[in-house]
Amino acid sequence: MLATKRGRQALAIAAVAIAIAPAEVRAQQESAADRAGERAAGGAPPRPSDEPVPSCLDQSIVDELGQSLRPRGVQKREFLKRGKVQILPRGGMLAGDLLSTSYLAGGAISFFLTEDLGIEASFDVTHVALDLDRPLAEFTGDDRFEPGLGFLALGGLLWSPVHAKMKMGESIVHADFLLAAGGGRLLHDSAQGYAFDGGLLLDLFVSRLVTLRFELRDLVLVQEATGETRLTNNLMATAGVGLWLPTGW
C-alpha cells in the first residue's frame, strides 16, 4: 500500500511539472517580448540578448550560404550603343528561290537612336544567274536568261530586345540579339518592284570598338525568269566585323 501511494504521488508530481513547464516557457517569451516592446517604446534599440539564440546548426548553415552566395543586383552593360555609328563590312551567300545560289558581299552602316532601336542602310553585290538555263541554252542555242551582277540596296530598322552574356573559354562575352526589318530594291532585270527583308541578327562584343555580326534574313521580292514570274523567298546568310564610332550625340 505504501509503495502504491508513493507511485501515485510521483505520477502526480510529474504531471504538474509537465503542465508548468510550457507555461514557464511562454512566460519567459512574453517577458522578453514585453522588454523589447518597452525598449522600442522608449526609443532604445533592442539588445541582441532579447532575440532567441540560434542553434549551432542554424548558424553553420547561414555561414556556409554566406560564403557561397553573392548578391548580383543589376549588371551593367560593358558597351552602350546609343548615339554611336556602326560600320559593318560583311559577306556570305544568297540562296535563291527561283534563281541560283550565289555569293553576297557588301556592307552596312547603322545608327542607334536609343540603346535598343537603330536605323540601318546597306548595299550588297551578288551574281544573279540561273544554272538550269545553261543546259537548255546549249540544247536550243537560245539564251533565255542573261546572268549578271545584281545590286541590293536596303534600309530598315534594328531592334535589340535581348542582351545576353556568353562564356567563351575563360572569358565572358556580351551579346545582343536583334530583329531587323526593312525594304529596298534589287537592281537587276529579273527583279520586279520592291524587295522586303526581315531576320535575326547576333552581335558579339569582343571589345569596346569591335563587334562580330552574324545575320540570317529572308529577302522577299517578285522575280521573273524563263517566262515564270512569282513571289520568291531568298535566304541571306552573312557574317561581318563591325566598327563602332562615337558621334557625341
Image: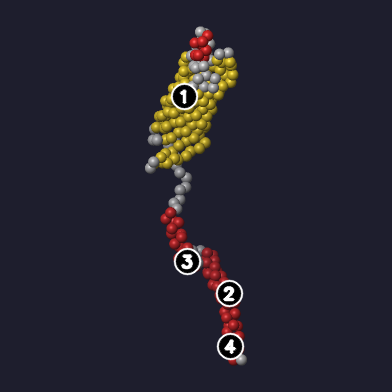
User: Badges 1 and 3: C-beta atoms under 8 Å apart?
Assistant: no
Foreground residue, 232 or 165?
Answer: 232
Q: Is residue 140 above or below residue 112?
A: above
Q: Which residue is mark 2?
A: 23
Categorize mark 1 by other alpha carbons within 10 Å: few (<14), some (14-19), many (20+): some
**Which residue is drawn at the image coordinates 43% and 26% (left, top)?**
90
- Measured as percent of width and height from the top left, residue 29 is found at 54, 70
Instruction: Mark 1 or mark 3: name the one nearer the start of the chain.
Output: 3
Instruction: Mark 1 or mark 2: name the one nearer the start of the chain.
Output: 2
Query: In this rendering, which labeled residue sits more in front, label 4 or label 1?
Result: 1
**Which residue is drawn at the image coordinates 53% and 26% (left, top)?**
218
Q: Which residue is mark 4?
A: 6
Distance between the Cα atoms at labels 4 and 3? 39 Å
Mark 3: secondary structure: loop
Mark 4: secondary structure: helix
Query: In this rendering, which labeled residue sits more in front, label 4 or label 3?
Result: 4
